[in-house]
Each structure stands twice: as C-alpha cells, then as structure tokens.
Amino acid sequence: MNRTSYGAAIREAFVYLLDHHPEVFVIGQGLWAKWYVGNTMTDLDKLYGPERIMDSPVSEQACTGAAVGASLCGYRPIVVHPRMDFMLYAMDALVNQAAKWSHMLGGQAHPAVTVRAIINRGGEQGAQHSQALHAWFAHVPGLRVVMPATPRDARDLLISAVLCDDPVLYIDDRWLYEWEEDLPPIVESPLEREGPRILRSGGELTLVGVGYSTRLCLQAAQSLATKGIQVEVIDLRVLNPLDPFTIVASVKRTGRLLVVDGGWRTCGMAGEIIACVSENLPLGMLKQSPRRLTLPDAPAPTSAPLERAYYFGESEIIQAVRALLG
Amino acid sequence: MDSTLGDLANSSACNAPLAIGNSDPARLLAQLRTMLLIRRAEEVIGEGVAARQVICPAHLGIGQEAIAVAVSEHLRGSDRVFGGHRSHAHYLALGGDLYPLLAEVLGKEAGCSRGMGGSMHLYAADKGLLGTVPIVAGTVPLAVGAALAAKKDGRGDVAVAYFGDGASEEGVIHESLNLAAVWKLPILFVCENNLFSSHLHISLRQPTDRIARFADGHRIPAVTLDGNDVVAVSRAAEDMIAGARGGAGPGFLEAVTYRWRGHVGHREDEDVGVDRGADLHLWKARDPVRRLADALIAGKMLSSDAYSALQADVDAEVMEAWRRARAAPYPPESHLLDRVYAEAGR
Ligand SMILES: Cc1ncc(C[n+]2csc(CCOP(=O)(O)OP(=O)(O)O)c2C)c(N)n1
Ligand SMILES: [Mg+2]
C-alpha cells in the first residue's frame, strides 16, 4: 500500500505505461512545463525523452488526428489536452474519425488512441476555460469515455484506457488532484470489464456521481451518516458504453435516486442515468421521483461571487438528499 | 532554427531611439501617452495579481504596447476589431475607457463585459472592439466574417484580427487567410510575433520564425517589421488599412516583439517554468516606450521634465480608476442565468 494523490496516481500510470509498453508515446501542449498539467506528468520528458513525451505547437486538431493515425500503425499514443475546452478544435479527429473507424471499415481497423482531457475550472477562468463536456462525448458510439473519481481509478483507468484497442476519452479533473488514497500494486485490467462501482453502501437513497461530483457525494454521504442517514454512493466511472445495471439494482433496494453531475443539465449525463433507471425499474418501485443536481444551464461566470453560486458543493447535495427523503 | 527574422528577432539589435523623421510631434506625443497608459494599467493589474486582488488569469502585454497603438491610430469606431487572451492593449489603444477595463479584470459589474468575462474577455463595441476571447485563434475567422459584413455594407469599414505566433499553428488561421484572400475581404491580420507560445520558443514549434510566410502562401501582401517601433508599425498599418478600405483586399502585418512578463500573471522571472533571464534583460533595451521617449527628447519635442509630468499624470489616472474599480460591486447572482440568451431568462 502506498499513499498517493490523484495527480501523482496519474503520473504513476504514465510511468507504468511508458516502462512496460514501448508503443506508448504522448503528445500534448505543456508537457515540458509544470504549469499545464499540474503534478500529473512532472519530469516525464526528462525520464523518457522528448521523442516519447512530445510537447506540441498549438495544434489540437492535427495533434489529435496524428495520434489517431499513429494508432492505426501499431502505436498507442496518448494525446493530452490540458483543458477540455481547447479540444473542441479536435472534434473531427475524435468524433468523425477515431470513433467511426472500426465500424465503418467493417471492424478491421481499431484506433487504439487515448485522449486525455482535463477539466480545469474555477479561479475566475470564465466561460471558455471551465467546461465539463463529458456528456457530449458519451453520446458518440465508438468512443469509450471514462472519468476517474478516485486516485486508484486515476491510475488504473488510464492504464486500461491506453491498453484498450478502441479510442478512449479519459477525463480527469484538477479539483481532484490533491485527494489521497492508499494504492495497491498495478494489475492490468481490460477496460471492457470496468463499469459503475458502489463506493459506499446505504439503504435509504442511491447517490450517483461522476468524476469530481463523486467526491462530493462521498463527503455528503459521510456527513449524512453522522446524522443517521445511510445513502449508497455509486461512481459512474465509465460513461460510454454505459452499463446502468449496478445503479438500477441499487435503486431497486433504496427506491430513491439522486444523480449529481458537474456538467450542464439539459441532455446531460444525469438525465441519461435517470432515463436508464426509469426504463429498467419495475413500475411502482420508486418512493420518490428521481432527481438530478447539475450545473445551471449557463456558461461558467467569471467573478468569484458568481462562481460560488454557480458550482454546487457538499451542502447542496445534502439538501437535495434531505428533500428526497422528505 | 533557420531564422528568417534575423535582427528583428535578435534581442541585441533594434534598440536605438526611433527614427521619427518628420512625423507630426503631436501624434508622436499622443502615441507616447497611450503607450504609457497601457503600460501603467498593466503594471497595476500585475500588482493586483501579486496581491491576489486580481483572481482571473491576466496575460500582460508589457513590452508589446507599440503595435496596438500604431494600428488603432488608423481605425474608426465602425471598424471591427477582434483579439485574444492578451488584449488589454488592443482595448485601450482603441480608446476603450480605463475604468471599465480595470473593473472587468476585477470581475465587477461596471466592467466592459459587465463582470462576466474578466481579463480574457473584453468588449467595447462603440470603439470597434467586438470581442477578445482566449481560445487561441478562435476570433480570427470571426474577424474574417466581420470583414465580409463590412464588404457587404460597402461603407469602407475594415476588420482587424490580432493574434500571436502560437495562433498561427492552429489550422483555422490558414483557412481564414485563404477565405480573406479569395473573397478579397477588407481585413488586416496583425500577428504579434513575440517568439513565444507560453513556455515554448518558436524554434521548438515551427521550422522558421517568420509568420508572414503563411500570408505569402495565400497571396496576401505582408510586411514583417520591428513591433517595438511605433512609427514603422503605424506607417505600415496606415497603408494596409487604407488599401483594405479602398477594396484592395486583405493585408498581413507581422510585428516582432517580446513580452516582459510571464505567459500569464505578473512575474518576470518565471515564465510558466521557463527562465528567459538574459534575453529578457536585452529585450528591455528594445523598450517601445523608451525608444520613442528618447527620440522625442533628443529631437527636443519633449523635455525630461515634461516626460516625468506625463508619467505622473498617467499614473494618477490609472490609480484613480483602480481605486474606483476596487470599490465597485460584483454582478448580482441573477446574472448567472439572465445573460445566456438575448431575451433575459428565456
Ligand atoms: C485552443 C487553445 N489552445 C491552447 C490554449 C492555451 N494557450 C493560451 S495562450 C497560448 C499561447 C498562444 O501563443 P501566441 O498565440 O503566440 O500568443 P501570446 O501568448 O504569445 O500572446 C496557449 C497555448 C488556448 N487558450 N486555446
Ligand atoms: Mg506569442
């Protein structure tokens, strides 16, 4: 066991992949600077050299497309977008190319590319430097989407993503980088076997989080437990392909569902989960209508007082849970 | 790297007082004042960053003031200007009011974007500034569209797209140049080539350092010059803007310069992990403000005392605006939702 922060866990995954898989290399902006990617890639360029850790020009589209191309030729590139917002220039490479390649060529070619996108918000960065667009990408068949919430997943899901033969979007969140956990030794595990996971058991309500919101859910569950309220916390982990059955089974037990997501509400991940549960739950099993807690349907504001109103925290989750429990 | 810029990119060259020739002294003095205003405003913003009064990312263009001042001289309120993340100078040079800029940087409701944008999102439509936002190269095609609208309007207005050397690495810049050329649009592309894109020198990003080569490829007339020479930039911008107004199509102005502060924030000594020590020191001798002031003083158009008085005057103006901005209120929470669509709240 080894106490490791989320940020350091990501770095451990890079080290493992670069040590054990010579076909892995990394392209992205800021890989030779400490500033862009926090503590998640410190000194990798010095350890593995600039040929495998390629800091790039400001060319998201070409870098992502090039990574897809190299992945069709035996490599397992990882493209790093230090901020998800910048990745929108790379939509074609991801959505039209990588996600479609296997299907439209009859299953004969598989772009084993991983795109790492970082959610980086707060600090008055404003509308173009704050977005959490995971739901968009989860909408695209052919593109696997994972969002680690815990340090262990930050490490292990990155390894699984890179070793997967499909294109994978791996989304980490800077608000999680300081979270520490004891990590077991690394065991490679196929991504296809990963899915939502129960992080805390409880019988009164099912609380589903994704990425950073999972952390908030855990904190809220802990506080509620001190008041004698036991909620179950499920971390979504794999957004696409989505396996709802862990969540459905939980709601069958609890009869109440609250989904918490740091993305927008309309057409978001929370709505998708509520839909899946609604479709799969026998009639009459719900004690309350399911609820979602999301960002308001507005771009991120800038000034600190508005940011405080825009982003929810533990107390908003607790309030929503209490409202559902009546 | 194979440098085509030569002395223009050489920190030890181009540091003499400006050759002001027979330029109009009143105009030179006005340029000097605007440059001083921009410099002082950005210094104060930098102090605000250091004191954690400014929270939003602030990209200072100290050292690059001459370019916006020279270009803006030839623009009018009906022109359409777009910028990026480092655009305080673009705003102020167009005549944007100081107080709303400082209020914006502090996230206050009196800001030029009503406190919803911060330093990276500026707006002053009455001066022709239609937006400066931080997705690299994102506003360049918008400027092309504004030029298209200007051409349709037929009133001789032009668009200006400010962008950096790093932005030229985005594909959309090349599409934009082609559109402007093939549709013969009234637009001036202004590339502020400060040789860096955050932590990376241009030699680590491109095979050579002259960005105007991309204009050559699209048959857009281009000039590359010392961006710290306000007189030279002004002359070139005048010609190209007049050409665009007259229907000659796009122009490309590459102004070579250097930023004194880090990529973001107030510090000089640490540029997102890069120490530029010696080079920065040399570039300070290429100071666009001092080279103009020295030329004016040498030409007896300005006394040392008058220069000191001018600096004091600018400082008082900036500090007064800063004090007001600091005391101003934040936007109300209701603005979270009622600014998303044109019809509030719907
Ligand atoms: C699409 C996109 N990619 C990356 C960034 C991060 N970024 C912000 S400014 C910048 C450097 C741009 O360099 P340049 O265009 O030369 O402008 P300068 O900062 O030198 O003024 C980068 C990479 C961004 N804001 N948008
Ligand atoms: Mg630059």
Image (cartoon, grey):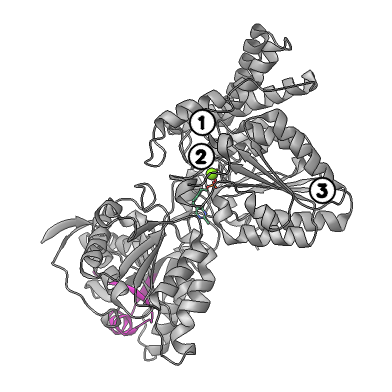
Residue A84 left/right relative to B134: left
Q: Position of residue B329 (x, y in %)?
A: 56, 36
The residue segment tinted magenta is A230-259
**Circle nearer the viewer, 1 or 3:** 1
Give the mark nearer the N terminus: 2 vs 1. 1
Distance between the alpha carbons at the discs numbered 2 and 1: 25 Å
Q: Which mark is drawn over residue B58? A: 2
Q: Residue at x 87, y 55 (%)?
A: B153
Residue lying furthest left: A1
Q: State how many labels appear.
A: 3
- Whether residue B284 appears in this view of the structure is yes
Q: Nearer the viewer, residue B229 or A265?
A: B229
Residue A291 rendering spot, x and y as whole percentages: 42, 72
Asked where in the image residue B313 lies, by quadrant, the reply is: top right
Q: Residues within 10 Å of mark 1 (few under 14, many from 20)?
A: some
**Residue at coordinates 46% horizontally, 67% vertically from top-left?**
A64
Which mark is first along the chain, 3 or 1?
A: 1
Residue named by callout 1: B11
Q: Are marks 3 and 2 on the same chain?
A: yes
Q: Which mark is residue B244?
A: 3
Q: Residues within 10 Å of mark 2 (few under 14, many from 20)?
A: many
First along the sequence among labels 3 and 2:
2
Residues at marks 2 and 1 touching, judged by CB atoms closer than 8 Å: no
Residue under the point 46% across and 73% down = A137
* In the displayed structure image, the side of residue A274 where residue B99 appears, left or right: right
Q: Badge 3, how many Cα within 10 Å: few under 14, some, many 20+? A: many
Please say whether residue B74 is one of the residues in the magenta stretch: no
In the structure shown, which secondary structural element does the residue marked by tag 2 occupy? loop
The chain letter under disc 1 is B
